[in-house]
Amino acid sequence: MTLLGWGCSSSSSKSEAGNQESQSENVQKASDGLTSFQLKNGIGPITQEVKVGPLDQKLVSKGEDLFENKCSSCHKIGQRYVGPDLKEVTSRRTPTYIMNMMMNPEGMIQKHPVAHKLLEKFATPMANMHVTKDQARAIVEYFRSVNPNTQK
């Protein structure tokens, strides 16, 4: 969309508009068609930002059990293994991103630049463990409990 300015348009505002258009073009080129929401929160079934509050100990316990059963063959807390160390994943990624990665690993690896770089680094694609939304949320709560930087 091109905006035409009439009247008292200053050269600095024209320059700022040009810079904004240039930045927008760069973001769009880098995102391969992803929205800013998808770049921040991933691609998958979770299409609205997941809000978290104080730690829910019941979810933490459920998430720890799920992590041990579904995730621990490839991921560890506090060390790199087949996949990345997940100790501080909630400091690096949004809860929504983490849930989308668990629920849609194939789509994330194909289309999301961060997930694709992780595949390049670890050389092993994340397996789809068919985690439900409720299970993914519980695992996120467990991750929050082991992250010393978790916002409470």
Image (spheres, rainbow, N blue to C red):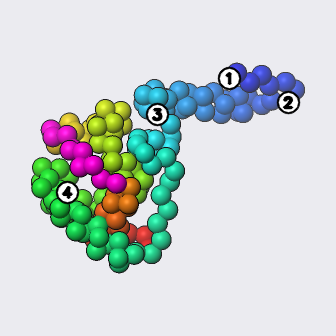
Q: Any mark on residue 8, and which?
A: 2
Q: Quadrant of the N terminus?
A: top right
- Please report whichever mark, 1 or 2, sits nearer to the chain's N-terminal start: 1
Disc 2 versus disc 4: distance between alpha carbons?
A: 60 Å
What is the secondary structure assignment of the residue under circle 4?
A: helix
Per the image, label 2 sits on a secondary structure element best described as loop
Region in magenta? 123-132
In the displayed structure, does residue 34 sit left or right of residue 9? left
Q: Quadrant of residue 108?
A: top left
Disc number lying in front (2 or 4):
4
Position of 24 with respect to 113 (left or right) is right
The answer for how far apart the CA atoms under marks 1 and 2 are is: 21 Å
Q: Position of residue 126 (x, y in %)?
A: 21, 44
State the image quarter where residue 30 is shown.
top left
Q: How far is mark 3 from mark 1, CA to CA? A: 19 Å
Verify CB contact (< 8 Å) between mark 3 and mark 2. Answer: no
**Residue placed furthest toward the bottom:** 57
Going from the N terminus, do you reach mark 4 or mark 3 first?
A: 3
Q: Residues within 10 Å of mark 4 (few under 14, many from 20)?
A: some
Q: CA distance from mark 3 to mark 2?
A: 36 Å
From the viewer's perspective, is 96 left or right of 127?
right
* In the image, residue 101 above or below residue 120: below
- The amino acid type, in three-letter code, at marker 2 is Cys
- Find disc 3 in the rendering and name its residue: 34
Distance in Å between CA atoms under marks 4 and 3: 27 Å
Neighbours of disc 3 within 10 Å: few (<14), some (14-19), many (20+): some
Image point (60%, 28%), residue name:
21
The amino acid on which the numbered mark 1 sits, given as a three-letter code, is Met
**Residue 71 shows which numbered tag?**
4
Please give the label number shown on residue 25: none
The disc, 3 or 1, on the residue closer to the chain's N-terminal end is 1
